[in-house]
Structure formats: C-alpha cells, structure tokens
Amino acid sequence: MYDYVGLTALVTGASSGIGEQFAKGLAARGAAVVLVARRADRLEQLAASIRADHGVRADVVAEDLTRPDATVRLLAALGERGVTVDVLVNNAGFATHAPLLDEDRQRVDDEVRLNVATVVELTHALLPGMVERRRGVVVNVASTAAFQPVPGMAVYGATKAFVLSFTEAVAYEVRDTGVRVLALCPGATQTEFFDVAGDAASVGRRQTAVQVVDTALRAIAARRSRSTVVSGAANRVGSSLPRFVPRRTATAITARLVGAS
C-alpha cells in the first residue's frame, strides 16, 4: 500500500460521489483532508464524519471553482491555514448533454473552466512542492468519454480528452521525481453527475463510487505505477475499441450510445 500517513490530500468536488469517496478512502489510510466544493453544509457533515471515524484533520473550503478567481482564493485559504498539499485529487467537473448549437454559452464556459482550467491551475500550483519533497500524488479524474469524440456531449468529451492527454504528459515529465500522477477514467458511475447530465448520458452498467476510487488507489499503490487507469472491465474493453475502428465509425457509435444520433 502507498503510505498516506502524515500526508494531506486536497479533494475537489468532495461533497458527493467520487470526491466524497476519495476523501473517505484517503482519510481511512491516514491522510488529513481538505474538502473543496460549493456546498458548505455537505462538506461540514463529511468533515465531522471523517474526524470522528478516522481521527485525522479535515478542513473545509467552500468554493465555486467555476469562478475565474476561485483557484487563487483556494490557494490563499490553504496558505492562511498552513496547509501543505501532498495529494491532489482534481475530481470536480460536470457535463452538459445537448448539441453544441443548443448549449448555453455561460454554461459551456463554466464547464470548460471547471473541467480543464481548474485542473491545470491546481496541478501547476501544487505539483512543484511535491517534486521538491520528492513525494506526492496527483489524480485527475478524466472519463471513458476521453477516448473518442462524443456527439451530444461535445464539450464534455473534449474536456476529458484534454485531462487525459495533460495528465499522461505531466506523468512522463515527473516520472523520476517520486511523484505519482494518474488519470482516472471511470465510465457511468452512481453519483449526482447524471442529475445534471441526464440519464441519457449514461452508457452501460454503472459502477459505484467506491469501486472507482478503489481502482485508483490500487493503481497508485501498484509497484509499477501507471499514468492512466480505466475503472471496470467492461469500460476497459469499451475504451480500447476506438483504436481498432475508423474514428468516424467510433464517433457514430458513441452518438447512438448517448442518444445523439
């Protein structure tokens, strides 16, 4: 197992779903946690539960990461509390499900900012300290949507393709520093994600958030650490198919799967 005792993990989108399970899983392994999301009440409840169950420090930073100044404000809050981040989980994100022509421009802007810009900004800000200490973990939550274009969810699919490419590149750059960088690619998962994206965006059998997080933590702990892990056997098969069919064909198949054809 990777030793998290004495480390501090920052988890975005921690108020529910995959983010909540990352916070619980890391705390159970001895890490202090910083919980970041918009819903302060949910974060406070989770923090109290983590303190009671695991006896570790749990800080709450209620922040809307779609705001252009959110990362600056979050980093300032960490500095004020004297928090050094050793584990970064960039989990916050959302999807819209409609043809681009029908999308609301502000909603799309928020989607790109949260799914892409925040991931880059937090990684860029916190990775240097990990490299200097020669220890740390960065998990960027991508998606099986990253492996092919997704008509009907064009923006979401493109943001997750960015996260996958970005993470794999950074993982290579820091490969000899002792820092582990992982792109986690879940498929459909039983979370509040589909309250926003809609059930039509769900493809295949949904995993639980616990299953997804366990996949990530096992990958981090593996002796030969990987830069990308797909959660679930069926999802691993599905994500590999675009390599064997023409890209136009993969796009058409995906369009039918998400109800965009």
Image (tube, rainbow, N blue to C red):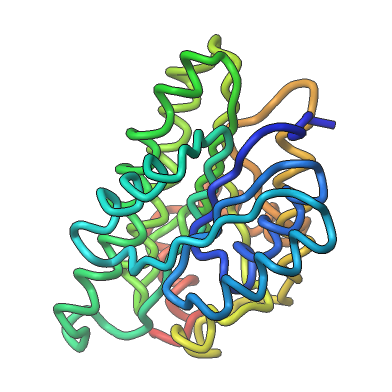
* Residue 202 position by quadrant: bottom right
* Residue 41 position by quadrant: bottom right
Quick one: 88 or 190, which is closer to the camera?
88
200 vs 20: above or below: below
Left/right placement of residue 6 relative to residue 155 reads: right
15 vs 115: above or below: below
The picture places residue 188, in percent across and down from the top left corner, at 63, 72
Could you tell me which residue is drawn at 73 percent across and 37 percent down?
Answer: 219
Could you tell me which residue is drawn at 34 percent across and 69 percent down?
Answer: 64
Can residue 132 be seen?
Answer: yes
**Number of marks drawn:** 0
Could you tell me which residue is drawn at 60 percent across and 15 percent down?
Answer: 178
Quarter occupied by the C terminus: bottom left
Left/right placement of residue 229 relative to residue 51 reads: left
Quarter occupied by the N terminus: top right
Quick one: 234 or 221, which is closer to the camera?
221
The picture places residue 142, in percent across and down from the top left corner, at 50, 54
235 vs 178: above or below: below
Could you tell me which residue is drawn at 69 percent across and 26 percent down?
Answer: 225
116 vs 164: above or below: below
The picture places residue 191, in percent across and down from the top left corner, at 63, 78
Quick one: 40 or 219, which is closer to the camera?
40
Can residue 162 be seen?
Answer: no
